[in-house]
Image (cartoon, grey):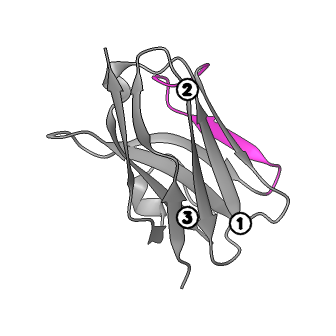
Amino acid sequence: QVQLVESGGGVVQAGDSLRLSCVASGRTLTMGWFRQAPGKEREFVAALTWVGPITAYADSVKGRFTISGDNTKTTVYLQMNSLKPEDTAVYYCAATKALKAPRVADSYDYWGQGTQVTVSS
């Protein structure tokens, strides 16, 4: 069992930046970020596969968000720049030890509790 703890959410204005962190209690193969806005489905944001490493991004955040990890391979960061009101959501960290499609929520076995990001216009 792997526990994930997110931090770094908050309330910012459009155009501002935030950095989210997610610490895993053990090694995994892929760690990703998903988000869910009120009344909407959970959607993929970004993922990092430690082998490579390989990153993937949703089109809606490409060029604005950057996912990275540290040398322990247990912590990932999501640097969010040029934030927009439509980025407002609860952001969830997820992880899996298996080689699965990183953009698909069902690929992940472990989830964090979520951290709120609110972007005001």
Q: Residue 54: give x, y in percent of width and height.
A: 74, 44
Q: Mark 3 or mark 1, which is nearer to you?
A: 1
Which quadrant of the rendered structure holds the C terminus?
Answer: top left
User: Label 2: which residue?
Assistant: 17
Q: Mark 3 or mark 2, which is nearer to you?
A: 2
For the residues labelled 2 and 1, the Cα–Cα distance comes to: 23 Å
Q: First in sequence: mark 3 or mark 2?
A: 2
Q: Quadrant of residue 99?
A: bottom right
Identify the amino acid type marked 2: Ser
Q: Are marks 3 and 2 in contact (CB under 8 Å)?
A: no
Residue at 55% in and 26% down: 17
User: Label 1: which residue?
Assistant: 74
| Callout 1 secondary element | loop
User: Label 3: which residue?
Assistant: 95
Q: First in sequence: mark 2 or mark 1?
A: 2
Which mark is on residue 27? none
Q: Residue 18: give x, y in percent of width and height.
A: 54, 34
Q: Residues within 10 Å of mark 2 (few under 14, many from 20)?
A: some
Magenta part mainly helix, strand or loop?
Answer: loop
| Callout 2 secondary element | loop
Magenta residues, as a range?
51-63
- Residue sitting nearer the eye, 83 or 51: 83
Reply above or below: 10 against 49: above
Residue at 49% in and 46% down: 103
Reply above or below: 89 against 52: above
Q: First in sequence: mark 3 or mark 1?
A: 1
